[in-house]
Image (tube, helix red, strand yellow):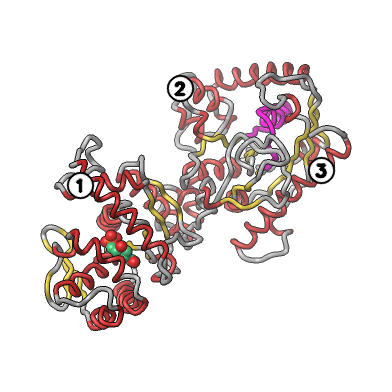
């Protein structure tokens, strides 16, 4: 397996790649060290770094070798160990110029591919996912804000480790200087013509400003597990459905709708059945369906227990509470905002687990679907953004209502696995691909890609649903709700086999397009049938 980790200076690529190499027994390939070694050679032998031809000649002749010592990895150039020399501020200042020369890059990329030819490599740099190993099974783009990166570097120079010691301090003047250098280097690295620093289209974006090194490593190990279980790495916008990189522009420019909750996303073979790495996909999938033990009959279940089990397995008090709450919410909302699901039989008469996708305009939207189907014996699990779970009380309430939280902006494989498991056991999963409530037709809409992949993993159809009128109950600029009728309409389920395209990825992309087109077509039908309703 090849794992590609790219990102700007000081984003923690080395620490992360080292840890992954150790934990997963991969060879660590520090490509920055190679550009640094060439830079050091030029400086040491008096070659003017602004002379592209001279620097390129050094790079083309250089013999760069990685070795091991008690302290870790060593690097030598033309037989000289330069492990320490390549980390000096002077090399820092000149390496961006050296690494921008096309012939230097060509020579280094050729050597990197040689070193990676045996496979089982974790390589870090700026162009690994885009140029060096474009077919890497897992691609990650690590970022962190510039101040956090400068702080880590400054602490590191003074012998500390800011990743492990959050209170670590560094000399303020030095930190400022490092920040300036980093910003300058980022600019040079991203604006150069040859292989500029940028994420590969299928890279998973991980912002680690507020994550510990262990959390970052775990996210990548999860991606590797998912890739192994699938025999193919999850791509951004697929496994990282909740990631900005996975958004797609709405096919309908004036969408309304949106949903509180999350964009759904993606794929991930049940997170590789978590620890099921390396197992055949079918085995991994089977593992995802197995509930993690029985729930306790009364109290003592964790939030995770609620997310991981079917709603019919919830303990009796929780089921009773849900029945009472659903009845009250149903009655109150029916009186205040008389709502109706048209063609409810399309939702009611299908016993399969389905991915329900819907436009999102108001907090009433999930209520209509969840309560509307509850009394037909169909359990609907909304994917909700984890930002809602600010307090234990909210988490308690949402978990009992069957919501599955998703951490947006991350590759939340756990949420993907839970949604897949719910679909597989016959529950419906509700996703608002617009990702947020859309308050007016002028509001730009982005569709969070990936719900289709989640459905695909569970072999579940996607059912489009639209709602109108719910937006009108909250006049703009107020939180007050006013009386108004709300109409909801379901469409026929869309089957992957009916899409007329082959290939997993193509099918998933087509499903995203078709499902959202149908949602907006249903919404437009409702608007025509109920003039004035938005
Ligand atoms: O990751 P680092 O700071 O050790 O990298 C040193 C420089 O090398 C950095 O400014 C950009 C360049 N580099 C590159 O252009 N391509 C790579 N694959 C790795 C590093």
Q: Is residue 123 visible?
A: no
- In the rendered image, residue 290 lying in the magenta stretch gets the answer no
**Number of numbered discs:** 3
Question: Is 93 situated above or below 421?
Answer: below
Residue pointed to by mark 3: 524
Report the mark closest to the observer, 1 or 3.
1
Q: Earlier in the sequence, mark 2 or mark 3?
A: 2
Distance between mark 1 and mark 3 Cα atoms: 60 Å
Instruction: Please provide percent x and percent y for residue 240.
Output: 50, 50
Name the quadrant of the C terminus.
top right
Q: Which mark is residue 174?
A: 1
Toward which corner of the image does residue 430 lie, by quadrant? top right
The answer to whether marks 2 and 3 mark residues whose Cβ atoms lie closer than 8 Å is no
The answer to whether marks 2 and 1 mark residues whose Cβ atoms lie closer than 8 Å is no
The residue segment tinted magenta is: 356-380
- In the rendered image, residue 368 lying in the magenta stretch gets the answer yes
Residue pointed to by mark 2: 392
Question: Residue at position x 72%, y 29% from top?
Answer: 368
Q: Secondary structure at mark 3?
A: helix
Name the quadrant of the N terminus.
bottom left
């Amino acid at each position: 397996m090849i794992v590609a980790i790219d990102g700007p200076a000081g984003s923690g690529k080395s620490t992360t790649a080292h840890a992954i190499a150790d934990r997963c027994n991969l060879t660590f390939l520090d490509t920055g060290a190679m550009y640094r070694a060439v830079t050091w050679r030029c400086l040491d032998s008096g070659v003017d770094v602004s002379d592209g031809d001279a620097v390129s000649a050094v790079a083309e002749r250089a013999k760069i070798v990685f070795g091991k010592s008690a302290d870790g990895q060593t690097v030598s150039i033309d037989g000289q160990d330069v492990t320490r020399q390549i980390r000096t501020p002077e090399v820092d200042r000149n390496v961006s110029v050296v690494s921008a020369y096309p012939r230097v890059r060509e020579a280094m990329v050729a050597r990197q591919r040689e070193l990676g030819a045996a496979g089982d490599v974790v390589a870090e740099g700026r162009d690994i996912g885009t140029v060096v190993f474009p077919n890497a099974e897992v691609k990650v783009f690590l970022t962190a804000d510039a101040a956090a990166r400068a702080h880590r570097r400054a602490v590191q120079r003074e012998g500390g480790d800011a990743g492990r010691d959050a209170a670590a301090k560094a000399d303020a003047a030095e930190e400022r200087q490092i920040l300036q250098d980093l910003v300058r280097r980022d600019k040079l690295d991203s604006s150069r013509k040859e292989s500029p620093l940028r994420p590969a289209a299928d890279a998973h974006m991980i912002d680690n400003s507020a994550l510990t090194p262990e959390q970052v490593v775990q996210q990548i190990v999860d991606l590797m597990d998912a890739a192994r279980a699938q025999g193919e790495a999850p791509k951004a916008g697929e496994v990282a459905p909740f990631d900005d990189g996975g958004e797609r522009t709405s096919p309908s420019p004036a969408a309304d709708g949106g949903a509180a909750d999350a964009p759904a996303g993606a794929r991930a073979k049940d997170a590789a059945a978590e620890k099921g790495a390396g197992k055949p996909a079918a085995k991994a999938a089977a593992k995802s369906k197995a509930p993690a033990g029985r729930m306790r009959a009364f109290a003592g279940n964790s939030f995770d227990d609620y997310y991981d089990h079917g709603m019919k397995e919830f303990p009796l008090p929780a089921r009773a509470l849900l029945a009472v709450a659903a009845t009250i919410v149903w009655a109150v909302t029916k009186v205040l905002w008389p709502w109706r699901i048209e063609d409810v039989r399309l939702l009611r008469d299908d016993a399969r687990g389905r991915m329900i996708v819907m436009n999102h305009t108001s907090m009433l939207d999930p209520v209509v679907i969840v309560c509307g189907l509850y009394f037909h014996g169909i359990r609907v699990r909304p994917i909700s953004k984890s930002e809602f779970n600010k307090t234990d009380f909210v988490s308690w309430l949402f978990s009992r209502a069957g919501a599955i939280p998703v951490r947006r902006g991350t590759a939340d494989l756990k949420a993907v696995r839970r949604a897949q498991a719910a679909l597989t056991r016959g529950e419906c999963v509700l996703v608002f691909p617009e990702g947020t409530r859309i308050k007016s037709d002028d509001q730009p809409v982005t569709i969070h890609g990936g719900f289709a992949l989640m459905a695909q993993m569970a072999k579940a159809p996607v059912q489009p649903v639209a709602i109108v009128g719910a937006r009108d109950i909250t006049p703009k600029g107020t939180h007050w709700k006013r009386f108004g009728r709300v109409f909801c309409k379901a469409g026929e389920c869309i089957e992957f086999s009916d899409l007329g395209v082959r290939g997993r990825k193509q099918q998933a992309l087509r499903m995203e397009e078709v499902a959202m087109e149908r949602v907006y077509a249903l919404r437009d039908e409702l608007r025509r049938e109920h003039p004035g309703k938005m």
